[in-house]
Amino acid sequence: MAALYRALSDPLLAERAIDVLDVGGRVVAALTGVAPAAGAALGIVIADDLTPSQSAKLDPGQVVAIATARGAFTAHAAIIARSLGIPAVVGLGPAVLAIDSGTTLLLDGDAGTLTVGPAEELVEQARGRREQQRRRAAVALTRAGEQGALASGQRIEVFANIGTPADAVRAVEFGAEGVGMLRTEFLFLDRATLPDEDEQVATLLEIAKTLDGRPLIVRTLDAGADKPLPALPMPAELNPFLGIRGIRVGLQQPQVLATQLRAVLRVAVEHPVKVMMPMVATLAEVLATRRVIDQARTALGIEAELEIGITLEVPAAALMAEQLGRHLDFFSLGTNDLTQYTMAAERGNASLEPLLASPQPAVLRLVKLIVAGAAQASAARGRNCWVGVCGEMAGDPACAVLLTGLGITELSMSPSLIPEVKAALRSVSFDDAYRVAEAALQASDAQAARALALDLL
């Protein structure tokens, strides 16, 4: 079946082969009682591709790095690997699968390279760089508990993206000042029935208590034909990334959205909880969601205010930032999808990696537009609409500098990335960040834009 998918001409459908293999492997494991062998041995794991569930099960104590033939930097499996602190180079092509087990390899996750049988001189140089990185990371970790701020004093909140209660524990350990995005999909995975309101309340309470007063931003269910859920079957679509996903699902399945919002409201009575909706493209969607929230508040008899935002991922929403901001408390930019839609490049397609690399100057221009729109909306309504970033750009120190120079005041990332991002922010002034960000808007490509920030660090 996977071979049939790979033979399809549509690259998006061809990528679904990895989902078939994922399901097949998990079924075999359940029938035989033998777990898949991913991550069983110490070394670099080479694979055709890794599914999100396989990536999540990798043990950083055994797997030192990952190299795959397929996939892209912004694919979900690569994101999970980075969240575990495992270097990964993806989309290397089928030749990587011919490498014999036991071969000495040199993998550079920063450069995106894999060297087969490297000379000893190269190995020693790499070991030296790795040791420098480890020392730098250790120093950054000692100050991870400090507030995020630029050298010139401007406050930048540094939050964590999490997907489970266990992630919340790691977030606190790495110095997160709150959770900028809780992916609620984990509550819906691998089950035939939807979680009820009480179950969702219990999980949110567990996370909120772990955060001990730190803010928690809950993203409502981000599902669709590209991220199918057994308990929420959806018809197949020719292009799921442009189909019914995110808030479109919530508004078409209002009972699912209402249950989530009631759970959020109940927890928000006692904890600093906010909510945001994914994949919003229009003002009508914002207003429709606010009506569902108002109905949930009335049904529960809860009068407390709830900060409401959106994960801004659609260029249409960026162009309407001022109008949307008049009805919202914040924007959190999902830069992975915002880049995908801006560059017309599917995020799992390895051959389009140059178009997906961050920071694309076109995307930076949208960020500047969004920040300006939010400021105009704040002035018009007399209430602040702040702008943060929860996409992968936030966890890249160079990109973090550019984003703060454009006026971003909150960055949310994988927990393990927090210490070094805070260290990078402490090393630059706002004037310098602003200067390089403005220059990056004129850069020829993402590599040139990023180089400008790297020169500051």
Image (tube, helix red, strand yellow):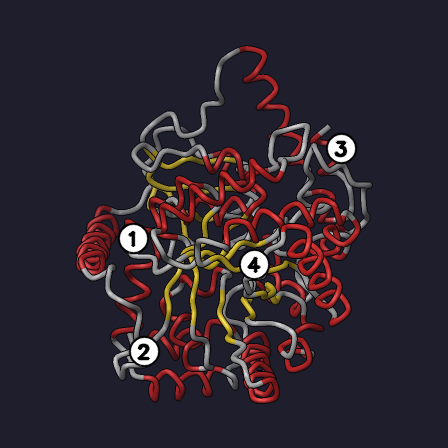
As measured in the structure, the alpha-carbon distance from the residue carrying label 3 to the one carrying label 2 is 47 Å
Q: Quarter of the image containing the C terminus? A: bottom left
Three-letter code, disc 4: Val
- Per the model, the C-alpha gap separating discs 1 and 4 is 23 Å
Secondary element under disc 3, as helix, strand or loop, is: helix
Q: Nearer the viewer, mark 3 or mark 4?
A: 4
Q: Are marks 1 and 4 in contact (CB under 8 Å)?
A: no
Disc 1 secondary structure class = loop
- Looking at numbered disc 1 in the image, what kind of residue is underneath it? Phe
The one nearer the camera, 434 or 305, is: 305
Residue at screen point 57% across, 63% down: 356
Q: Is residue 313 left or right of residue 213?
A: right
Name the N-terminal-most of marks 4 and 2.
Answer: 4
Q: Which mark is residue 455?
A: 2
Q: Which residue is mark 3?
A: 4
Q: Amino acid at mark 3?
A: Leu
Q: CA distance from mark 3 to mark 4?
A: 41 Å
Which residue is at a point 61% across and 88% down the rendered structure image? 380
The mark found on residue 275 in the picture is 4
In the rendered structure, which disc, 3 or 2, sits on the residue that comes first in sequence? Answer: 3
Q: Nearer the viewer, residue 372 or 341?
A: 372
Sequence-first disc among 1 and 4: 1
* CA–CA distance in space, label 4 to label 2: 37 Å
Mark 2 or 1: the one toward you = 1
Question: Which label lies toward us, 1 or 4?
Answer: 4
Residue at the spot of label 1: 174
Which residue of the protein is positioned furthest toward the top in this rendering? 32
Q: CA distance from mark 1 to mark 3?
A: 44 Å
